[in-house]
Amino acid sequence: MTTDALPDAVPPMIDAIVVTGSDSSAIISWTTDELAGSFVDLGTVSGLLDQTVGDATDGLEHEVTLTNLLPGTEYFLTVGSSDRAGNGPTESAEVSFTTLTTADVTPSAAPASLEGISGSQSITLAWDASVEADLAGYNVYRRGSGDDSFVALATNLTLPQYTDLSVQNETEYEYQITAVDRANPANESPASAALALTPTLTAAPTVPTDLRVDGEDLQPTFNFTNAEPFLTGASLSYTIQVSTQPEFSDVTDSESGIAAGVGATAWTITRALANESTYFWRVRAVEGALLGAFSPSQEFTASTGPLLAGDFGDSGSVDFDDFFAFVDAFGGTADDFPDFDLNDSGPGMAIDFDDFFASVDGRSTTGRRIGAGPPSCRLRPGWCLDAVTGHRALAGAGTGRCAGLRHDPDVGPRGAVLCGRSACANSRRGWALSRVPTAP
């Protein structure tokens, strides 16, 4: 932020005064060259303006509505504005207008140049803005295939655009737009020319893929591979929704306009989720007015424990750092190492092989199970974890034995193999690591 070199001592300049009157009210509008408030001095005698109506909201475009006016009466007024520095007020020259003798029954002109874009389960409409000074808004009407008449879809829109998300693909819909003024009762314009459009599944970007969750425990990061745009070279943004319900009947958090990354995109939720609670998330690609379909919802659990079973370092995969972290906790109790109690054995219970094999279910490509083997295996020099003591020990060259496990020849000369008597009862639960760090 850069401040002005000198204090603001210049009052605002007023321009473009417009008066739009009816039988009992009038709308006064004008502009200023800087942010300023608004007020109108009003009276029925020139030079004697004894009523003031104002709005302290600062803006560049100003509008004041005068009510309870007498029909067929001439009024005189000036408009004024003061800026935020207290300069002014600047007041206009006096102008006059005469209210209508009867109620305003003249509608606005029909909106022109209605256009639309068909997407997948969406239709986006746009039309020329009305120049009527007493415009209140726009109404959108729709007629579906097989319907006899148009039905109001949206009313009193303030912008000349609308996106219809309640459409079905491969079904034709017709649309008309009307303009409504501020008379009481309001006057509605004739309808615009009808526009027929058909949404289709192919008129949208593809669905993002490879969804995964990682990062902080209760404020995770959502990752996915980018979608492909419908139009070659078009830019995409993304919308992510998080809910406690698989059908997204409630939305815990939602973010739109997420900028696409290179090849893949990640977004970190800005609010903390509830610990040990299950959530669902999904993502869709947005290509201008074209909305892609949401991805299938993905379930995850927000937890202060590891997001992936066995991923004690929250790295997104189960690796050697996690293996040796488990070794350090092995034999301790769930009270001291709650994150390692993966089988939920509870307070006072030991961290044991049941917990280890629970972590195996969350392993990444850094490890693999070893199938049933001969009753013993001869180890190359490397590290072993004793199933009874939970201690690591360096196996002697050619002397280490692991009952119930077959040594993995891919481990290498300093192979790390889990072994011990409690693991031997079920040789299918044997585990060997396919990559091994240098022994400490």
Image (cartoon, helix red, strand yellow):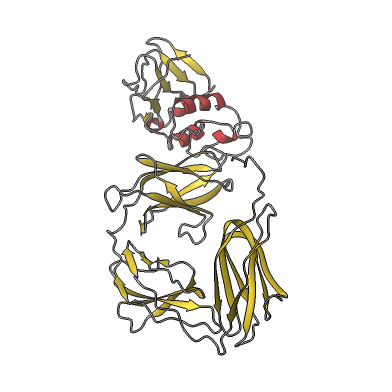
Q: Indicate the quadrant where residue 40 lies.
A: bottom right
Vertical placement of residue 130 versus 281, above or below: below
Say above or below: 227 vs 331: below
Place of residue 184 in the rendered image (x, y in percent of width and height, measured from the top left): 56, 83
Residues 298 and 408: in front is 298
The part of the image, by quadrant, that contains residue 373 is top left
- Name the residue: 43% across, 71% down: 130
- The residue that appears at 58% across and 32% down in the rendered structure is 350
Find the residue positioned furthest to the top.
397
* Residue at position x 60%, y 80% in the image: 25
Q: Can residue 155 be seen here? A: no
The percent position of residue 52, horizontal first and vertical second, equals 70, 72
Q: Is residue 317 visible?
A: yes
Q: Position of residue 73 (x, y in %)?
A: 62, 86
Q: Is residue 350 left or right of residue 428?
A: right
Residue 40 placement, left or right of 16: right
Q: Is residue 249 above or below residue 342?
A: below
Nearest the viewer among 412 and 243 is 243
- The x, y position of residue 88, in whole percent, is 68, 58
Q: Nearer the viewer, residue 388 or 211?
A: 211
Q: Quadrant of the N terminus?
A: top right
Q: Nearer the viewer, residue 74 or 298?
A: 74
**Residue located at (36% from left, 73% from top):** 112
